[in-house]
Amino acid sequence: MCVLCNGGKKEGNTDRRMSAGLIKHNILLLTSPRLGSFLLTFSTINRLLMKNLLFAALCLMTSLTLAQSAWTPANMMSYKRLGAVAISQDGRHIAFTVADARMNADQSDFLTHVWVSTAGGPPAQWTFGDKSCNSPQFSPDGQYLSFRSSRDTEGASQLYRVRLTGGEAEQLTKETDNINDYAWSPDGKSIAFTMNDSAAVRIKKDKKEKTDWQVVDKFDNAQLFVLSLTKNKEGKYPVRQLTNGPYHVTGMAWSPDSQTIAFAHQDGSWANAWPSSNISTVSANGGPIKALVTDAGLDGGPVYSPDGLNIAYQTSRGDLDWASKQSYRVIPAQGGKPVDIAASYDESPTGGPWWSADGKNLLFTEGYHTSSHLYSVPSSGGGKPVKLSTHAKGLMSAMSVSRKGDIAYIFQDTETPAEVYAASVTAMQGKKISNVHGDFMVNQPVSKSEVISWKSKDGKYSIEGIVTYPQGYQKGKKVPLILNVHGGPAGVFTETYTGQSSPYPIQAFAANGYAVLRANPRGSSGYGTEFRRANHRDWGFNDYEDLMAGVDKLINDGVVHPDSLVVTGWSYGGYMTSMIVTKTNRFKAAMAGAPVTNLMSFNGTADIPDFLPSYFDKEFWDDPAVYAKHSAMFNIKNAVTPTLVIHGLNDERVPPEQGFQLHRALQRRGVPTQMVVYPRQPHGFQEPKFIQNVGDRTMGWFDQYMRKRVSPPKGTTLESKR
């Protein structure tokens, strides 16, 4: 049931209670012994009361404005998260999701709802209620908006649709498991979707009977289903299962005639299985599965050409390296020899492919240094990619493309909040559609950020980073620095808005007097395959030197004080943080988030056991020396830096034992340390109270030790400056 409600009632009651309190307070003041025998008439009291109330209201408004104008982790949690952009095939409607942090006495989550803009007009909220609604799509004829939600179920996410002319949302599925990915058929008569069939029922039963043991590496794989939008005799929308193979379906695409579905699948649902991804086809009415692409490495993301004769897909072309090199191929829909599409600059597309209306080109998005762009490349295999987007800085993401070339996307830069924009492939100057953040921190200036570069110590590369200056920074004044290291290692710091909520609240750091350097050392994406693979068998060494060279640049430029440095990072950034504290004592404090600290034990406990052998060429039992050399735990005797360790207890990517090893070793060495673990949290934290707490705790840790000087204990081999 679609609930249309006015969320202002509770706020109104609060306002009335506040007014009553102010009146009581004023009466107490007026009758206080301090006033002696001063007598007031009732009308005088009323006039004074109104003046006092007005003054108090103005003071309250001023205090609220000042409170919001302070960049703090708490205030930054009011930043709304945009995502899941969808444009209708005629380009008339644009849907997107807005997620608000819900941080009540017994809640800590993000409530997501769907908004819709029509004909470029102001968007309106389309879904309501206390259950999230996400994954919006439009029916091919533009009559319906569909979405996923658990609003009427006991936790399982189902499919819904609602007419764009208004009315109640209709629940289309009543499955026992979550609906995952889904796609409308071009004729609008069916919806294909993936689901982990029967997993929820079995898990619930096993828990109840206390037989819920788990066989390691046995996965609940998603299969492919089709929902008919024609009701059967029982008045239900029938569902047909199309696959039941020993694989996990990761995506699907309909043929233009709605008769066939191409789908990608891999050996299991865990991240380690990506090199096994292949593509098959099946009739939408059911029948035998036909293998289409069975090459080694990743092959996935199939998309039919407008005429249905060909399928474009993303491929690693047999390359199994985890610092992946990917491109596109086009294969005849009935099978045959694929055509290689010209490689892009970074060889790592992030969105697409989408076919142009005439089928002559493929569109895709890809990162370029600290930005990202939309490109076009001939689908015939000739030519080179051409950049279509025109922005000089900033980041475009979550792109949706209609069949006639209309596009909708999210755009942001370091000083401008994310909003939804509309354009077309022939007119890329985007029009701003949403104004979700129009009232976010309106009274607070955003600290300036800029991209800087420096030469690597070995002279091989030009390294880039984004530096955010402290609020009110004056050139020539030396300030404290937070070195922030990204994850990956093939991650990249991009020009995202620095005021968004995050375990690293950049604007809060800047408001507290810190400059923040977010560097992209060798191994980062966005700079080409050679650069991305330049840390091969070299974690924590030349990439470390790249980071230190960036810090030295800011010191030499007179921006940063050399005795006021702290460092932090998450995942691979946590790995680098743990390595940094074993290599130098130049940092006064560190925060290691979800850090990889022991490559040997990590390889045996993480959900990606092929990852490190890809970077280091061998298993740890075949080359233990290289694993030890590049692990903080085998060099921990050098560490003296006070270190805060943060870890989620449900982290399968970097299991908590990695953080415990670092914390216990530092503790036994007498190095100041604290470890904080967060229940339920996977590798990336999901609960807003915890996200805020990490920001608050990190800033408090840095502030505490910036006022202290820690001397290295005897027996260490640390460099004093490097």
Image (tube, rainbow, N blue to C red):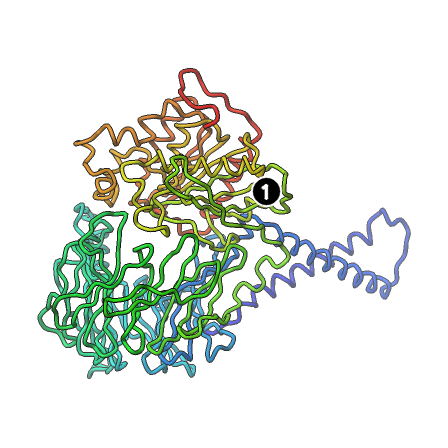
Towards the viewer: 592 or 377: 377
Towards the viewer: 49 or 635: 635
Q: In the image, is residue 511 above or below residue 443?
A: above
Type of amino acid at the residue the image marks with label 1: Asn
Please give the name of the residue rendered at 40% of the width and 40% of the height, measured from the top-left corner: 593
The percent coordinates of residue 554 (x first, y second) are: 53, 38
Q: Is residue 505 visible?
A: yes
Residue under label 1: 512
For the C terminus, give its image quadrant: top left
Drawn side of residue 666 relative to residue 298, left or right: right
Please give the name of the residue rendered at 8% of the width and 70% of the height, measured from the top-left corner: 288
Towards the viewer: 449 or 610: 449
Dividing the picture into quadrants, the one containing residue 95 is bottom left
Q: In the image, is residue 557 above or below residue 192?
A: above
Please give the name of the residue rendered at 35% of the width and 71% of the height, measured from the top-left corner: 147
**Extreme left residue here?**
288
The percent coordinates of residue 47 (x first, y second) are: 83, 64
The percent coordinates of residue 91 (x first, y second) are: 40, 78
For the N terminus, give its image quadrant: bottom left
Dividing the picture into quadrants, the one containing residue 661 is top left
Dividing the picture into quadrants, the one containing residue 302 is bottom left
Picture mark count? 1
Q: Is residue 97 visible?
A: no
**Extreme top residue here?**
714
- Rate crowding at label 1 as few (under 14), some (14 to 19) or many (20 or more) other CA atoms within 10 Å: some
The percent coordinates of residue 517 (x first, y second) are: 49, 43
Label 1 residue SS? loop
Please give the name of the residue rendered at 43% of the width and 62% of the height, measured from the top-left corner: 396
Drawn side of residue 40 relative to residue 553, left or right: right
